[in-house]
Amino acid sequence: MPGDRSGPARRPDTPHVEDLAVPYGLGGSRSGGILGTFTSVDEEVVVGSISVFLVDDHEIVRRGVAHLLDREDDVTVVGEAASAAEALARIPAVRPDVAVLDVRLPDGEGIGVCRDIRSLLDPPPACLILTSFSDDQALFGAVVAGAAGYLLKDVAGAGLVAAVRTAAAGGSLIDPETAARAVERLRTPSDPRYDSLSPQERRILDLIALGLTNRQIGDELFLAEKTVKNYVSSLLHKLGFARRTEAAVYAAGRRRPGQLPPTDGRH
């Protein structure tokens, strides 16, 4: 730790950022893979700047995003977590203006963390959900949880910085049409069959509805083909269907409320 320093006021309990390995490819470049070292001893938090908390189970992603945001004079990363449990324990202590959350975490989902911290803290932080691929179910979940935005991880660096500023100012990056569809889905009577599916099974069901094979679904979700097959068998059983085509029709029907096919009696 360095000695006394003059300068801007510092928020209490702000973590230090030291010797961060960051991918220079972050910030819009898709090349990636080139690593360097960013050293910042006693990172200072300027009072009045936008404080950001990062939640992602991949350390290199957290480091890269932290490097990207900390380059901005009005943005400071005040903490990070690799799991939902860590996030729920640490975020209340630092009370960030914005939380950037990966949609998938080892022990849960970023959407759940968003919902929990927004109900726990007053004022609540603005939440930006970050994901590797587009997922309608997760998008609707983000809207319902009160997230300010839902961004793909291939967003350009300038786009992420702009999103943080918009969220901190109380703005929304979710278009009104998407929000309206989420509200309409909430008004649609719940189907216990669908409710019994895990988040991963729901993602796979949506991809089945798009006509993807098990291998294509595996490529999309970074899963082994055999793993996808097991998920498909499980979701068919839960929905009460014997054939994949029935599941596809069912998924399409969920997008048009009132057109859900009946089960064949199996549960």
Image: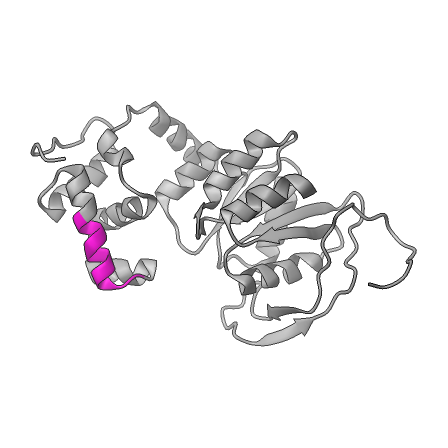
- Whether residue 112 sits left or right of residue 165 in the image: it is left
The answer to whether 39 is drawn above or below residue 243 in the figure is: below
Q: In the image, what residue occupies the spot 52% across and 57% down?
A: 155
- Whether residue 153 sits left or right of residue 98 in the image: it is left
For the question of whether residue 174 can be seen, the reply is no
Foreground residue, 13 or 50? Answer: 13
Q: In the image, what residue occupies the spot 32% across and 48% down?
A: 200
The answer to whether 115 is drawn above or below residue 150 in the figure is: above
Q: Main secondary structure of the magenta part?
A: helix
- Whether residue 246 sits left or right of residue 108 in the image: it is left
Foreground residue, 93 or 125? Answer: 93
For the question of whether residue 92 can be seen, the reply is yes
Q: Which corner quadrant holds the N terminus?
A: bottom right
- Whether residue 103 sits left or right of residue 29 in the image: it is left
Q: In the image, what residue occupies the spot 17% across and 38% down?
A: 239
* Residue 143 is inside the magenta segment: no
Q: Which corner quadrant holds the C terminus?
A: top left
Q: Position of residue 123 (x, y in %)?
A: 65, 30
Q: Position of residue 96 (x, y in %)?
A: 67, 42
Instruction: Say how many tags the image has.
Output: 0
Q: Position of residue 255 (x, y in %)?
A: 27, 35
Q: Position of residue 196 (x, y in %)?
A: 26, 36
- Colour scheme of the rendered structure: one colour
Foreground residue, 158 or 91? Answer: 91
* Residue 228 is inside the magenta segment: yes
The boundaries of the magenta stretch are: 223-233
Q: In the image, what residue occupies the spot 21% across and 26% down?
A: 258
Foreground residue, 234 or 52? Answer: 234
